[in-house]
Amino acid sequence: MTDIAAEFDRLVREGANITMELRQEPWEKLLQLADPNGVVVQLVEWVAPAGT
């Protein structure tokens, strides 16, 4: 996955059960959702360190 923000937008449009909104840390972008059985799935996109 190379564009987690676009995937987040798609999931919201599809009505996914988002349990943690898209957030960004200096080293990663992540979001969390639950599937219909309640299993929590976390999607992560790693961010390259500054200067690389």
Image (tube, rainbow, N blue to C red):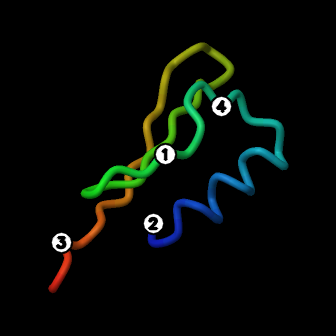
* Badge 3 vs badge 1, beta-carbon distance below 8 Å: no
Question: Which is more N-terminal, label 1 or label 3?
Answer: 1
Front of the two marks 3 and 2: 3
Rendered residue at 50%/41% (across/down): 31
- Which residue is under mark 1? 23
The answer to whether residue 31 is left or right of residue 27 is right
Question: Which is more N-terminal, label 3 or label 4?
Answer: 4
Q: Residue 1 carries which label?
A: 2
Question: Which is more N-terminal, label 2 or label 3?
Answer: 2
**Type of the residue with mark 1:** Arg
Q: Which mark is residue 14?
A: none
**Type of the residue with mark 3:** Pro
Q: Quadrant of the C terminus?
A: bottom left
Front of the two marks 1 and 4: 1
- Structural crowding at the residue carrying mark 2, measured as other residues with C-alpha within 10 Å and reported as few (<14), some (14–19) or many (≥20): few
Rendered residue at 29%/66% (across/down): 47
- Structural crowding at the residue carrying mark 4, measured as other residues with C-alpha within 10 Å and reported as few (<14), some (14–19) or many (≥20): some
**Type of the residue with mark 2:** Met
- Which residue is under mark 3? 49
Q: In which quarter of the image is the N terminus?
A: bottom left
Q: Quadrant of residue 34?
A: top right
- Which residue is under mark 4? 18
**How far separated are the C-alphas under marks 3 and 2?**
18 Å
Looking at the image, which is closer to me, 35 or 11? 11
**How far separated are the C-alphas under marks 3 and 1?**
17 Å
**How far separated are the C-alphas under marks 1 and 4?**
12 Å
The answer to whether residue 47 is left or right of residue 43 is left
The answer to whether residue 41 is left or right of residue 22 is left
Question: Which is more N-terminal, label 1 or label 2?
Answer: 2
**How far separated are the C-alphas under marks 4 and 3?**
28 Å
